[in-house]
Amino acid sequence: MAENTITLAHGSGGRAMSQLIEDLFRCAFDNPWLNQGNDCAVMDSPPGRLVMATDSHVITPLFFPGGDIGSLAVHGTLNDVAMSGGKPISLSVAFILEEGFPLADLERIVRSMADAARQAGVPVVTGDTKVVPRGQADGVYITTTGLGRVSEGVNIAGSRARPGDAILVSGTLGDHGVAILSLRENLQFQTTLESDTAALHELVASMLAAVPDIHCLRDPTRGGLSCCLHELAQQSGVGMIIEEAQLPVREAVAGACELLGLDPLNVANEGKLVAICPGHQAQALLAALHHHPLGREAAIIGQVVEDAHGLIRLKTRYGGMRHVEWLAGEALPRIC
């Protein structure tokens, strides 16, 4: 069985490692920069400001409805670049593989990464592979770094939210986290739940074309919408009020959260974004979102208000008001 699994030899720098790189990684990610065979990628510097983001991925299970750790690793880093308003240019990837990991599963993951990168139009230009002894990892860990370019005039930052701004989300909340949890716990629903993992940079480009003065963008991954809003409020020194009736949550997600004692506001997303823009431009931004396939279920969910304490408050369906607290602990481990 050893020939069908990762061995320590695949990380030794010798013939086995070279063959793994040639037969799998270089074949899957095929592009001129990677094919140079160097330990780095030499690329022309684009005009504008550079943006760079790094993300590590340790999800369990590795394969789930709507995606896998490979596509997730590509989408997650591209989205971090896109949240600055940047256009992604290239990716690097580093694998930590556990001895005994099935080569068939690794090939499936790498092919998924390659497909995701190709569909996004962003090449994987360099990378690294390490192998650790059996029992010192959980199959495979992936770290990706993305490089992008921010055009002149684009100024998106977590510190730019202002009282009177509108808060929007690009679609339904909690899909990714509940899809992962349903697989782990073998939960059955009338509707198939899939991860929302997707690359958002083209959606962001269409949003900026409609509303160049977007103040903040953030993808609500770990910790969900709640943590995302708390981070933005803290950076900007403001408060926020969101409306429960306006939050887009699928029935199956709401039902699963109720069953498991979870709040959809705390559940991870991998293909959604939060946008904050001047209030008078909210409808134009919403229209741009609705025009894109990844924004058809977008909604205006609240507004930014003056609040030196940076509180996030939720207006309930019944007209009451409650505080949305920071997530305490880890509601869903190993989610991205």
Image (cartoon, rainbow, N blue to C red):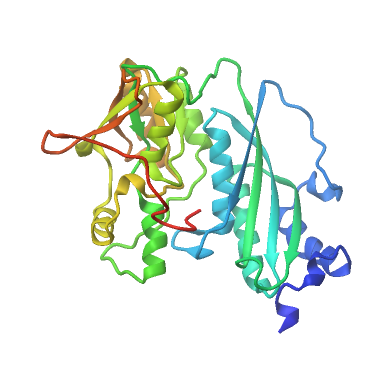
- Nearest the camera: 247 or 261? 261
Which residue is at 35% across, 50% downward? 174
278 versus 104 height, above or below: above
Whether residue 126 appears in this view of the structure is yes
- Nearest the camera: 171 or 292? 171
On screen, residue 323 versus residue 329, left or right, reads left
Furthest toward the bottom, the residue is 1
Whether residue 291 appears in this view of the structure is no
165 versus 12 height, above or below: above
Q: Number of marks in the image?
A: 0
Furthest toward the left, the residue is 318
On screen, residue 106 versus residue 42, left or right, reads left
- Nearest the camera: 181 or 294? 181
Q: Hey, which quadrant is residue 76 in on the image?
A: top right
Question: What x and y, as percent, mark residue 311?
Answer: 32, 29
Which residue is at 69% across, 64% downward? 97
48 versus 87 height, above or below: above
Q: Hey, which quadrant is residue 165 in on the image?
A: top left
